[in-house]
Amino acid sequence: MRPRGGWARILVPVVLVVAATMVPYLWAWSRSSTGSVFGGFLLNPQDGFSYLAKMRQGFDGSWLFRLPYAADPGPGVFLFTFYLFLGHVSRVLGANPLVVYHAARAIGAVCMFLASRALVEKLVPSPKGKGWAWAMILVGSGFGWMGLPFGLLALDLWVPEAIPVLAAYASAHFPFAIAVLCMAALAISPGYRGRSAILVAGLSGLLLSILQPFAVAVVAAYAVVYLGLDVAAPAENRQGGDRR
């Protein structure tokens, strides 16, 4: 179904926001002096370098994660599959892992914003409310900046999972996880009942367990609350939907 106002009204802001998240990285890379190398991360570089280390294992052909800094790396376990996969992509394309990482970050951000738009369209009733919700998702944040003069660093300035635009800026797997989380919420929301919803919800749970295992608990809590309210509601007030 074509969105009201056309696809350009949705895609243009998404592309602009995602492109804006690239600017600080390009600026930092351009400022690297002779003899120095930009590491590729501007927020939480310790985690960022661990992602590249996992990608390196995938680049070398492994689908199992091993602790590279342990005296005994062990036989390998099926963890951090997303970054192992990106490593395989990097090898197949012959591309720099850092380039593949940021390309995945941009693609994930686009998926996140589009999925969140679909969730807004489904759950926010008024057109004005949809617009405000969409704007807050695209560029909104908290009031953590007010604590900076007092030496306080609020969560909305350093926890990417909390703010969509910060997730788009900081990480490759957080945006994908949020996109899947939105799809899971859509699958168990009014109008998404039936076998197709079960398939979407099951696939979303599987992807979340790979991308961000802790987020599965969020979907479960949402489902319990919504289904509980639906069961408690009078039969004539229950939401209908597609039962195909």
Image (spheres, rainbow, N blue to C red):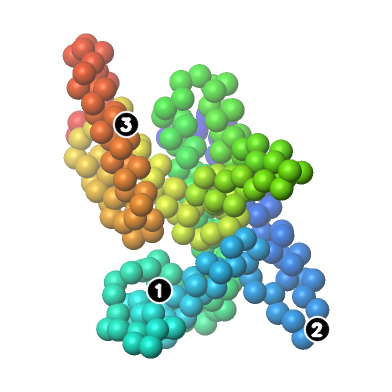
User: Considering the numbered disc 3 on the image, is that residue within a helix, a strand or a loop?
Assistant: loop
User: Considering the numbered disc 2 on the image, is that residue within a helix, a strand or a loop?
Assistant: loop
Q: Residue at x 20, y 22 (%)?
A: 231
Looking at numbered disc 2 in the image, what kind of residue is underneath it?
Thr
Q: Which residue is mark 1?
A: 84
Q: Which x, y percent locates residue 171? A: 54, 59
Give the mark, 2 or 3, whose residue is nearer the N terminus.
Answer: 2
Q: Residue at x 21, y 18 (%)?
A: 232
Q: Which x, y percent locates residue 61? A: 38, 84
Mark 3 surroundings: few (<14), some (14-19) or many (≥20) residues within 10 A: many
Mark 2 surroundings: few (<14), some (14-19) or many (≥20) residues within 10 A: few
Give the mark, 1 or 3, whose residue is nearer the N terminus.
Answer: 1
Q: CA distance from mark 2 to mark 3?
A: 55 Å
Q: Which residue is mark 3?
A: 189
Q: Quadrant of the C terminus?
A: top left
- Image height check: is 237 above or below 223? above
Q: Residue at x 48, y 77 (%)?
A: 53
Give the mark, 1 or 2, whose residue is nearer the N terminus.
Answer: 2
Q: Which residue is mark 2?
A: 34
